[in-house]
Amino acid sequence: MKKENVRDFYDVVWTEYIPEFSESKRHLELFFASDEIRDKEILDCGCGTGIFTNIFASMGARKVTGLDISPGSLGTGRKIQSDLGLTNVEFVEGDMLELPWADASFDIVWAWGSAHHTEDPDRALNEIERVLRPGGSLLLALYKKTRLTWIHEVIRKTLIRTPKSWWVPLARILAFLLWPVVKIRELFRKKARGGESLSELILDWYFVPIRHYYLPETIRHFLESRGYVVEKYHPGSGRFESASNFIFKARKP
Ligand SMILES: C[S@@+](CC[C@H](N)C(=O)[O-])C[C@H]1O[C@@H](n2cnc3c(N)ncnc32)[C@H](O)[C@@H]1O
């Protein structure tokens, strides 16, 4: 699978997906206080519809750049930017495996749920590291490898072999079948994510062309071996209580 497949997938699936602003802001504030953002130059790498790009900008960053390969998602991000009247934001279409900036260009690089959808996540991490200034902060959210990962991968690899025109109907059928299970789970814990229907969640989870999973200790080792200081780690408690991600915030030496 190639990056073009990922781009086309997100152009169809993600452009309408706009996570709830205040809920996302509360989540961002778990990692960055306003005074860490003020006057900073920030890259939101694999920004999707730019929710975090626009939140950073609204919190007083000097300039926030949202980069993504999906032009449709960027279009949504630009619309939100214009609705909010933000002037310190730029959305750039590009590949995070070849970031179009010089070394040490940003104070903060935020890469939420994106590196694991690239053809070469190691290269994505190297690129992110390259454009981050010494002393800058890196935020990395990645899919967590669990005992169930292989089952999810068997299902995903089976489903993405079906004709593309089947994907949305298939996701709807799966959502219909899984709905009672999800409702029962919701009685016991918070809803997984705001803004997305169950069929959109299934589409995003099982039909995405490229997906890699990591053990948190692998990423901790990657960061510490390069001299980063891990400042925050959230195990399995990603955006809106999702257990599928883990998150590191680390400072570059
Ligand atoms: C799960 S979405 C996350 C979007 C956003 N970070 C958020 O949290 O709302 C993953 C994003 O990574 C982008 N992406 C995947 N591969 C990419 C690449 N090689 N270069 C840039 N963006 C990429 C996709 O287009 C998609 O918008």
Image (tube, rainbow, N blue to C red):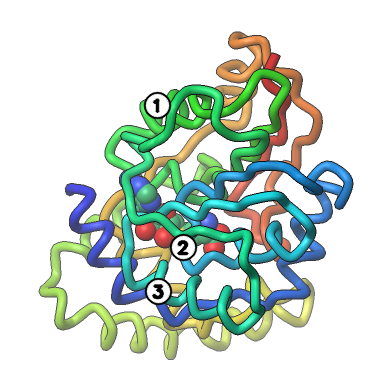
Residue at image point 36% right, 27% down: 123
Q: Which of the numbered marks, if any, corresponds to residue 202?
A: none
Residue 151 visible in the snapshot = no
Residue 176 visible in the snapshot = yes
Q: Amino acid at mark 2?
A: Gly
Q: Which of the numbered marks, if any, corresponds to residue 48?
A: 2
Q: Which of the numbered marks, if any, corresponds to residue 122?
A: 1
- Residue 111 versus residue 80: which sits nearer the camera? 80
Label 2 or label 1, whichever comes before in sequence order: 2
- Residue 141 versus residue 99: which sits nearer the camera? 99
Task: Tell me the quarter of the image containing the C terminus.
Answer: top right
Task: Give the alpha-carbon distance from disc 2 to disc 1, as whole Å.
Answer: 20 Å
Residue 187 on image: x %, y % = 76, 82
Is residue 127 positioned above or below 33 on the image? above
Looking at the rendering, the quadrant in which ligand 1 lies is: bottom left
Residue 80 on image: x %, y % = 56, 78
Q: Amino acid at mark 1?
A: Asp
Label 3 or label 2, whichever comes before in sequence order: 2
- Disc 2 crowd rating (10 Å Cα; few below 14, some 14-19, many 20+) is many
Ligand 1 under 8 Å from disc 3 Cβ: no
Ligand 1 under 8 Å from disc 2 Cβ: yes
Task: Label 2, secondary structure: give it.
Answer: loop
Direction left: furthest residue: 163
Camera-side mark, 2 or 1: 2
